[in-house]
Structure formats: structure tokens, C-alpha cells
Image: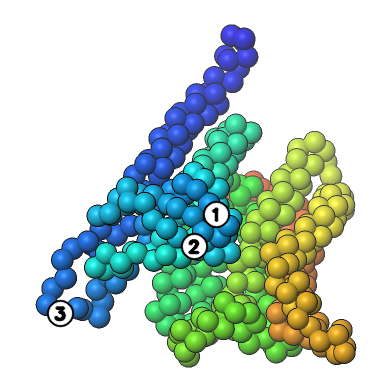
């Protein structure tokens, strides 16, 4: 047991530390985090501002259920611990579950319940995810989580506010994709030569993916309005948000995540092949690397298609149920929602297929010329002669 601990002391300590921090975070969310805005309880002034809070959400614990009706105990606000009679819509809670209830200014409380309080479960799952990554991959896994956090922050605090404030959605998505590629990938994989080579390949293939996405959006006549959510966004924003740009840009960002996987793995495979057989020529290294990459891309294309199908499955089933059976199946496939899913899958898959030969070629050449490239990056100049030679 001591030998086991001594061999894995650092990773065990890291895991124990993150487990403790994760537990504290989860307990804080369970006991202190609430969607309730306490300003709703303040006395109203003699006028009501157009921006003043009119309603908020309060947590409530389900006590008992009778069909779609039941009793809950309020957990937030001035009427905390009150027992309320409510109706549950499109949900089947169990006693002990926590749900959300709308509370209006003035104390009126909605009798309808449509939402669970999900944050404790979401945070617990996130904590378990981080712990699993640290246990399996150690420090490198932790850095990959840091890269993920950076990607989310770029989208949440950079891309979304920029688009909402009226910037061109397509170019905002492109800029965000390049920022994510450069910063998060370096953080996740560390700044080393292998990461530099991978990044060069990613940026090149990402540029090709942008061209493919633009071509796919143009040839498929995509408007960006393909379901209820996008229609509501169009209605709410008017002409302020380019939904076609959001759609095409979203394809680019989705493709980037898979490119990181396949290109970094491909670069690592070529590097390891070179270390195992340093005498391999560029042609031989490229051939072996491409063979490895072919197996990888075959599985990833299938994974990508299934991921898109899985996400959109409820909408597709709904469309099939409401589709007029007297119409042609081509009419169903021609709907914008299904067409954009097909185009999304094809564009991403083409980018992945191109990524294999491009990443393999760049990695093979860069690894074979590693010393010269590092010298150039450091600003050194190799000279055959010079002052000392002349002397």
C-alpha cells in the first residue's frame, strides 16, 4: 500500500484536494445558491420603473403529489416555509424534489410549476467530471479542463455579448474560433514543439473549414431560421442578429472541437513514430502517419454524425410525426432543419478528412526539421562560414 501511494503520491494528493474543493463547492450550491432575487421583496415606490424587477423564481420542496397537483414548501423569500397548493405542468416530480415557482412583486405566487431546480445536480456532475479527468490524466487532464473553461469563457463573455450587441455574427464566431484554438489549446496541451506543430495544422484546416461552411451555407440556401428557437431569436432581435452567420459560425466552432482532438492525436502519432524509427524519410513517415489517421477519422466521422443526430433527434421525430404522408420524402429532407443538419455533418466531416493528410504532412516535415525550425523561432542563423571561418 505504501509503495502504491509513494508511486502515485502527487496524483492522489491532487485528486484528494480537488475532491475536497469540489465537495465544498457542491455544498455551497446546495445550501446557499438560489435563483431568488431578494429585491422583489422591497416595498414598491410611488411609481414603477420599466426596468424594475417584476418577478423572480423561488425554490420549493415537493411535499406530496396527487396526479398533476400537489403541495410544496417555499424555500426562499418573505414567505419562506409557507405550504402552497400547486399544479405541475409537463413534469412528474417526486416528494423531496426541488422545483421553481414564480414569485411576483407584491407577494403573489404562481400556482403553476414547470421547472426543476437543476443546479445542484449539474454542479455535482461537473465536479465528478473534473475528478475523473484528474484521476485518469493527472496534471495534463487538469490543464485540459482549464482549456475547456477558457473556451467557455470566450463564448460566454466574448462571442455571445458581441453578437447580441449587433456585431457581425459570422466574423464574431470566426474570431472566437481562432482565439479558442490559440489560447485554450496551448493551455490544455502546454507550450511545446508538438503543440506548436498541432496549432499550425489546426489554423490551416480551420481556415479550410470556414470556406467549406460558407460554401455549404450558400449552396444549401440556409437562412439560419430552422426551428422554434431560431424563429424566436429572429422575432426578439429583428434584423439585429444575422442568424445565417450564427448558423455558419456555429458549424465552425463545433468543427474546431473535433479538429483539436484529431490533429493533436495525429501530430503525437507522427512524433512517436519518428522517435521509434528516427531514420524514416518524410515519405515513409507520412505514409505510416496517414495509415494511423485513416482509422481515427473513420470513427470520428461516424461519431460526429451520431452526435448531431442525437442532439436533434426530438425535433426530427416531431417533424416526422407531423409530416404529411402524401408528400414525398424528399420534401421532408428538403426542410431547412434537416438540410442544415446534413450540411453541418458533411462540412465538419470534410474538414476532418482534410485534416488527416494536412496534419500528417505538416507534422512529418516539422518533426524532421525540428532543429532548424527551433533555431529560426529563437532567432538564430545557421551559417556555413562567417568571421571565424574567414580567420
Q: Is residue 314 left or right of residue 237?
A: right
Q: Closer to the camera: disc 3 or disc 1? A: 1
- Badge 1, how many Cα within 10 Å: few under 14, some, many 20+? few
| Residue assigned mark 1 | 66
C-alpha span from label 3 to label 1: 42 Å
Which callout, 3 or 1, points at the residue further toward the start of the chain?
A: 3
C-alpha span from label 2 to label 1: 10 Å
> Residue 215 occupies which quadrant of the picture?
bottom right
State the residue in front, 23 or 68: 68
> Residue 335 occupies which quadrant of the picture?
bottom right
| Residue assigned mark 2 | 87
Contact flag, marks 2 and 1 (Cβ < 8 Å):
no
Name the secondary structure under disc 1. strand
Residue furthest toward the top?
2
The residue that appears at 46% across and 46% down in the rendered structure is 63
Q: Position of residue 350 (x, y in %)?
A: 78, 70
Residue furthest toward the front?
66
Which callout, 2 or 1, points at the residue further toward the start of the chain?
A: 1
In this view, 253 is above or below 188: below
Contact flag, marks 3 and 2 (Cβ < 8 Å):
no
The residue that appears at 52% across and 45% down in the rendered structure is 95
C-alpha span from label 3 to label 2: 33 Å
State the residue in front, 37 or 66: 66
Q: Position of residue 378 (x, y in %)?
A: 52, 50
Amino acid at each position: 500500500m505504501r509503495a502504491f501511494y509513494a508511486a502515485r503520491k502527487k496524483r492522489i494528493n491532487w485528486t484528494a484536494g480537488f475532491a475536497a474543493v469540489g465537495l465544498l463547492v457542491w455544498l455551497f450550491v446546495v445550501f446557499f445558491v438560489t435563483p431568488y432575487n431578494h429585491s422583489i421583496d422591497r416595498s414598491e415606490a410611488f411609481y414603477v420603473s420599466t426596468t424594475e424587477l417584476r418577478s423572480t423564481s423561488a425554490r420549493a420542496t415537493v411535499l406530496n403529489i396527487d396526479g398533476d397537483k400537489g403541495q410544496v414548501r417555499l424555500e426562499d423569500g418573505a414567505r419562506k416555509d409557507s405550504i402552497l397548493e400547486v399544479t405541475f405542468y409537463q413534469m412528474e416530480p417526486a416528494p423531496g424534489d426541488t422545483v421553481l415557482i414564480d414569485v411576483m412583486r407584491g407577494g403573489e405566487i404562481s400556482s403553476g410549476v414547470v421547472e426543476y431546480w437543476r443546479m445542484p445536480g449539474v454542479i455535482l456532475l461537473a465536479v465528478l467530471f473534473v475528478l475523473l479527468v484528474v484521476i485518469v490524466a493527472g496534471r495534463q487532464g487538469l490543464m485540459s479542463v482549464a482549456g475547456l473553461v477558457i473556451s467557455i469563457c470566450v463564448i460566454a463573455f466574448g462571442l455571445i455579448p458581441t453578437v447580441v450587441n449587433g456585431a457581425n455574427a459570422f466574423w464574431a464566431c470566426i474570431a472566437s474560433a481562432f482565439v479558442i484554438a490559440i489560447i485554450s489549446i496551448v493551455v490544455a496541451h502546454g507550450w511545446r514543439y508538438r503543440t506548436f506543430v498541432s496549432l499550425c495544422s489546426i489554423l490551416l484546416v480551420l481556415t479550410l473549414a470556414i470556406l467549406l461552411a460558407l460554401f455549404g451555407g450558400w449552396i444549401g440556401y440556409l437562412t439560419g431560421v430552422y426551428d422554434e428557437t431560431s424563429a424566436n431569436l429572429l422575432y426578439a432581435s429583428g434584423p439585429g442578429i444575422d442568424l445565417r452567420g450564427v448558423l455558419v459560425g456555429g458549424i465552425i466552432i463545433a468543427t474546431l472541437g473535433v479538429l483539436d482532438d484529431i490533429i493533436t492525436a495525429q501530430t503525437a502519432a507522427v512524433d512517436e513514430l519518428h522517435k521509434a524509427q528516427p531514420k524514416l524519410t518524410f515519405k515513409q513517415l507520412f505514409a505510416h502517419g496517414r495509415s494511423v489517421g485513416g482509422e481515427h477519422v473513420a470513427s470520428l466521422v461516424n461519431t460526429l454524425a451520431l452526435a448531431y443526430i442525437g442532439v436533434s433527434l426530438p425535433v426530427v421525430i416531431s417533424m416526422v410525426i407531423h409530416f404529411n404522408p402524401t408528400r414525398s420524402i424528399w420534401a421532408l429532407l428538403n426542410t431547412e432543419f434537416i438540410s442544415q443538419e446534413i450540411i453541418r455533418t458533411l462540412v465538419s466531416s470534410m474538414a476532418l478528412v482534410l485534416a488527416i493528410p494536412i496534419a500528417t504532412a505538416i507534422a512529418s516535415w516539422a518533426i524532421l526539421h525540428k532543429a532548424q525550425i527551433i533555431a529560426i523561432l529563437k532567432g538564430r542563423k545557421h551559417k556555413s562560414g562567417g568571421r571565424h571561418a574567414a580567420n
